[in-house]
Amino acid sequence: MFRNIACAFDGSEGSRRALDTALHVASIDKQKLWVVFVEELPRFTGVPSETNEERERADTIFAGLRQEAIEAGKKYGVEVIAEKRVGHPAQALVHYVKEACVDLLVMGHTGHSKLWGTFMGTTADKVVRHATCSVLVVR
C-alpha cells in the first residue's frame, strides 16, 4: 500500500510510539523505513563556540537515536535508514517528505515541546496541514 514510509523521531515518548507503529506498518510489506531527526539550531547566541557545542551535542544525540531506531528495526525485520535534517521541525519534515517522495509520514502527536505546542500548535498540527503525503499521527 505505502512504498516510501518515513518516521519523525526525536527520542520523545510520542516519537517512540510513532517509531513502533511505523516499523509495524513497514514490516507488513517488507518495506524500508526512513527515520528523520530534525536538529533545530539555536537562535543567534552571539558566541560561535556555543553554537559549535550545540551542534556536537546534537550529533551525539542523533547518533544515539539512529542506533536505537536501527536496533528497533531489527526486531521487526525492517531496514532502517536514518537521516538528520537541520531547521524548524515542521518545515524540515514537510520539505523532506516532498523531496524524498514519501507516501506516509508517521509521527507522534507531541514531542519534546509539549507546553509550547499547547499554545502555538504542535509540530504534528503543522505537518498535517502542509505535507504532500498521508500523515499518521500516533498518540
Image: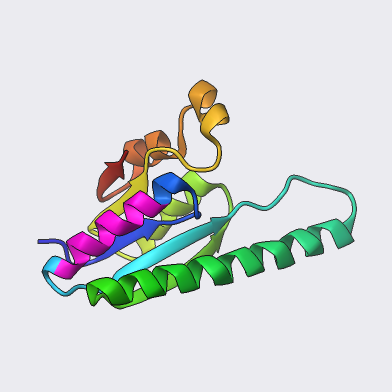
Residue 18 rendering spot, x and y as whole percentages = 33, 51
Q: In this view, does 121 lie above or below 41?
A: above
Q: Nearer the viewer, residue 105 or 23?
A: 23
At 50% across and 55% down in the image, what residue appears?
A: 11
Magenta stretch in the rendered image = 16-27
Residue 22 rendering spot, x and y as whole percentages = 27, 58
Instruction: Give the left or right position of residue 20, taking residue 26 as reference.
Output: right
Residue 74 rendering spot, x and y as whole percentages = 31, 77
Q: Which residue lies furthest to the front in this view?
A: 75
Whether residue 94 is visible, yes or no, is no
Instruction: Name the colouring of the figure.
Output: rainbow
Instruction: Give the left or right position of residue 99, taking residue 60 as reference.
Output: left
Q: Which of 67 and 90 is in front in this view?
A: 67
At 26% across and 64% down in the image, what residue appears?
A: 23
At 20% across and 66% down in the image, what residue appears?
A: 26
Whether residue 55 is visible, yes or no, is yes
Instruction: Give the left or right position of residue 127, taking residue 83 as reference.
Output: left
Q: Is residue 11 above or below residue 71?
A: above
Main secondary structure of the magenta stretch? helix
For the N terminus, the image quarter is bottom left
For the C terminus, the image quarter is top left
Instruction: Give the left or right position of residue 123, taking residue 5 as reference.
Output: right
